Image: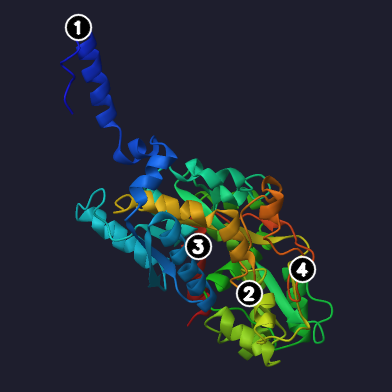
Amino acid sequence: MNMPDDNPRIDRRQALAWLASAAAALSVPWSARAQARPWSNTVAAARGQTVFFNAWAGSDRTNAYLQWVAGEVQKAYGIKLEHVKITDTADVVKRVRAEKAAGRGARQGTVDLVWINGENFAAMKADGLLFGPWAEQLPHFAQVDTVGKPTTLNDFSVPTDGMESPWGMAQFTFFADSRRLPEPPQSMNELLALARQQRGRITYPRPPDFTGTTFLKQALIETVADRTVLGQPPVVADFERVTAPLWRLLDELHPHLWRDGRQFPQSPAAIRQMVADGELLLGMTFNPNEAANEIAARRLPATIRSWQFAGGTIGNTHFVAIPYNARAPEAAQVVANFLLSARAQARKADITAWGDPTVLDLARLSPEERAEFPAQALPGQVSTPAPTLPEPHATWVDPLEREWIRRYGR
């Protein structure tokens, strides 16, 4: 940067002040300076960039949706979106952490955008592995429902602080064939009573499967004496004391489960198939629309109904984040903004495309935008949504899983 020398009205004091302001600007982290640019500049810089989007690839619908997104951002913004298919986001965290240890700085990374939430976000935030803040400056963020859906700003009790952009909603949900289970349980205690009556016909996925761990957290929330302690790390909350009622509940429950609680299915998909076959009474998912998706695909009967416990079930938001060393941070922001558009969110909410609930406040949309969203409930969708219970702090996940495996996993 050269100091201007062709203005005779700049005296020594002015020159020194100019140099000081320039030095201060340079001392600001690159990511923070980048956020000061107008959005039009970000869009212009994004053209021609490639975004390597690391995202779970375990769903054909999700993969197809991302292919659609890739086509749209290419046409509209000249951005090439590459879906890097992963099975575990923790592997991405390890890779970015290794890149930082190797000294790979700004624009030298291999990940531009990552689908993330929970303990993986908490780890990246704590280790300084994230670009930003940027998310709340996206033009479409103004339409996000941050009041009715507070988890759009709080990820497993960790404030997002603009370091990740909300993408979709999730809430722990059960489903069953109404012909076999006309009065579904409305709490963990009622689930225990049902298991006693219907021995061998209930189970849950083996932790650390995400849904299996969520089952543990749901049971923990319903058994803990003071739920507020779950908003802080377990070391502070006294893990052994707080979780004692949880293990007592599971000790009572397990002997009545499928295969006497000595084995657990590896995934919610396996349980879903056993529900379809009539072997199990109920399944569980983190997508309230999953049963509707399966009915539409004719993998579950139309008599399946979905519900959430009357007192509420755990819910959260899933996000996209940009690593600190992304090669294409401008294009990553443009893609994230497109993912928040009414058009992209409506397509994602459509069960024929994906069936992932929106993060937007529909009241903030134009009538034309609202019309793009499904207008009525479909067979298998939750008819009466229950309250959303906040996730425990992200640091509860690892000790819960370790203790479960020590007690029941061998």
Can residue 321 be seen from the camera position used here?
Answer: no
* Residue farthest along the front direction in this orientation: 75
Mark 2 and mark 3 in contact? Answer it, CB < 8 Å: no
Residue, disc 4:
377
Q: Which residue is mark 1?
A: 11
Q: Is residue 325 visible?
A: yes
Q: Amino acid at mark 1?
A: Asp
Q: Are marks 3 and 1 in contact (CB under 8 Å)?
A: no
Which of the marked residues, 2 or 3, is nearer the chain's N terminus?
2
What's the mark number on residue 352?
A: 2
- Looking at the rendered structure, which numbered label has been put on residue 397? 3
**Disc 2 element:** loop
Tell me if mark 3 has few (under 14), some (14-19) or many (20+) residues whose alpha carbon lies within 10 angstroms of its own.
Answer: many
Kind of residue indicated by mark 2:
Thr
Task: Using the numbered discs, state the Cα–Cα distance from disc 3 to disc 1 in whole angstroms.
Answer: 61 Å
Packing grade of label 1 (10 A; few <14, some 14-19, many >=20) is few
- Mark 4 and mark 1: span between their CA atoms? 71 Å
> Distance between the Cα atoms at labels 4 and 2?
13 Å
What residue is at 61 percent from the left and 46 percent from the top? 143
Q: Amino acid at mark 3?
A: Val
User: Residue 85 occupies which quadrant of the picture?
Assistant: bottom left
Q: Is residue 363 above or below residue 376?
A: above
